[in-house]
Amino acid sequence: MQSNNPFLKNKSFEKPQVIQVDEEGNRSVIIDYNETMSISGTINKSLIMLLILVVTATLTWTMTATGYNPMPFLIGGGLIGFVLVLIASFKPHLSTYLAPGYALFEGLFIGALSAIFEAMYPGIVIQAVGATFTTFLVCFMLYKYKVVTVTEKFKSVVIGAMITIAIYYLITWLLSMFTSFQPVHYGNSLMSIGISVLVIVVAALNLFLDFDQIEKGAQKQLPKYMEWFGAMGLMITLVWLYVEFLRLLSKISSRD
């Protein structure tokens, strides 16, 4: 079982081998450590992507505050970001170019979404940002110091939860589209808040799978472009976590 992140479960995380055969027919594996994935390299590229996302999100936020309609940024940024994710899933060697592009367009999406929520619930964005990075740091420290160990059972439980959530959202979305059915996770009921908390927990657990895959990728000396690939996958999880925190906090705020 691999990470449920569409990036980090990609077969590209299998170890590549470059075989050299000498004149006597002896075979040897060639590894250029200057051109292989490293944890530090992935961290650096994750920070670059985060910077790009913050810059474009700030730009969108500022434009929305001056009267621009945030919907084109929300829809356009979200759709283009999703397309880039799909392309990189099948063409990971293009991640060097696709990952920064994803951060740019996802920043437009995040900026617009944040501006909409902030207009409805002042102060919610800083709370969601703080909750997201606190969750990330806690999960990272738990993984770093082996408090949480990613086992095959751990992976299967997280992936099973992800599949359940995905099926639930798909079914309720289809029912709400074609019937008068009102999904239980809509609104601000205690049940709806509970579902949001559950989704956030699953997203946080997914971070452990992402950390594990990045570490394993570095150990296998994967190609250098996989640093961008891994960073992009990690960014996808962080964006998902942030959006879920926005939804949870908005439900709680609307009950006041």
Image: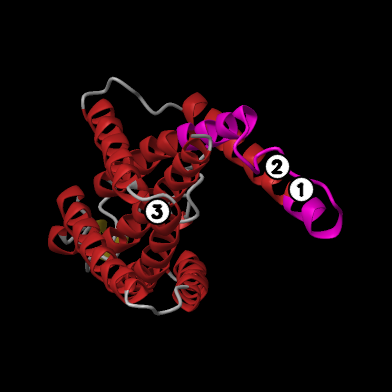
- Lower position in the chain sequence, tag 3 or tag 1: 1
- Cα distance, mark 3 to mark 1? 23 Å
- Specify the color scheme: secondary structure
Mark 3–mark 2 Cα distance, whole angstroms, equals: 20 Å
CA–CA distance in space, label 1 to label 2: 5 Å
Is 183 covered by the magenta stretch? yes
Vertical order, 144 against 101 (above or below): above
- Quarter of the image where one finds residue 227: bottom left
Q: Which residue is mark 1?
A: 171
Q: What is the span of residues highlighted in magenta in the rendered image?
A: 173-201
Residue at (31%, 48%) from the top-left corner? 217
Q: Are marks 1 and 2 in contact (CB under 8 Å)?
A: yes
Q: Which mark is residue 239?
A: 3
Q: Which circle's residue, 3 or 2, is located before the other in the chain?
A: 2
Reply above or below: 42 against 128.
Answer: below
CB contact under 8 Å: marks 3 and 1: no
**Amino acid type of the residue tagged 3 in the rendering:** Val
Q: Is residue 78 left or right of residue 170?
A: left
Q: Secondary structure at mark 2?
A: helix
Measuring 25% from the left and 60% from the top, which residue is drawn there? 50
190 and 89: which is toward the camera: 190
Q: Which secondary structure type mostly characterizes the magenta part of the structure?
A: helix
Q: Looking at the image, can residue 19 be seen?
A: no
Three-letter code for the amino acid on which mark 1 is drawn: Ile
Q: Residues within 10 Å of mark 1 (few under 14, many from 20)?
A: few
